[in-house]
Image: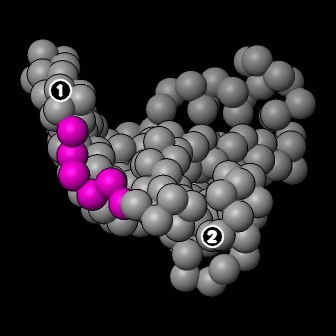
Amino acid sequence: MSSCDLVEDLLEGIKEYGSPYNTAILTCVFVIALTFVASTLSGNYSQVDKIWSIVPTVYAWIAVCDRRTLLMACLSTIWAVRLTWNFHRRGGYKWPPWDGDEDYRWKHIQEGRIFTILKHPVAWHLFNFGFISVYQNILLLLISCPSFVVAYAAASSKECSGASQHQLIPLDWIAATLFLALIVIE
């Protein structure tokens, strides 16, 4: 990253093997394939639900490059542990991992209650791939975008101005405290 242009640097970073952007996108593609295959083979279309709390945290850790992104990843991990525990308590995780409760809405959609075309197996598999697997996993990647924006800002401030902001400021601690308070009262 050297142009200090977000879009240009992002596109360059996506192409650069091993960059955080490239790693996150490759991880997303892998998770898309994994959830599609697991849901198709098991007939349980809630595979993305099982990783909803976990995957954004993985992306946040991929973006870690300084103290601020580390703080963000740690907070994301706390959120993920709470959400994952709640999902586990409701029976969302069982062994084998593709088993577990399925969101009742997928069955209603598959039965054609909303769109009758989805009763057709080919249409359902296309829906499973396009909406359940691809769209929702891209959404999970987008949830982690604040971490990548902060990582980009840290890298570009170092390259574009020669300065680096490695210290957390009081606003970081206020935001972290507010975040933790909201998790506690939730």
Can you say whether 172 is above or below 48 in the image?
A: above
- Which x, y percent locates residue 76? 28, 45
Q: Residues within 10 Å of mark 2 (few under 14, many from 20)?
A: some
Q: Please name the residue that numbered disc 2 is placed on.
A: 1
Q: Residues within 10 Å of mark 1 (few under 14, many from 20)?
A: few
Q: Residue at x 30, y 61 (%)?
A: 66
Residue closest to the eye, 3 or 75: 3
Closer to the N terminus: mark 1 or mark 2? 2
Position of the N terminus, as image quadrant, is bottom right
Q: Residue at x 87, y 50 (%)?
A: 122
Q: Which of label 1 and label 2 is nearer to you?
A: 2
Q: What amino acid is at disc 1? A: Ile
Q: What amino acid is at disc 2? A: Met
Q: Please name the residue that numbered disc 1 is placed on.
A: 174
- Which x, y percent locates residue 159? 53, 67
Can you say whether 150 is above or below 38 in the image?
A: above
Please say whether residue 114 is visible from this viewpoint.
yes
Q: Is residue 108 magenta?
A: no
Does residue 79 appear to the left or right of 30 in the view shown?
Answer: left
Can you say whether 185 is above or below 38 in the image?
A: above
Residue 41: give its label.
Answer: none
Q: Which residues are magenta?
A: 164-169
- Which x, y percent locates residue 150? 44, 48
SS of the residue under disc 2: loop
The answer for how far apart the CA atoms under marks 1 and 2 are is: 30 Å
- Which x, y percent locates residue 111? 72, 28
SS of the residue under disc 1: helix
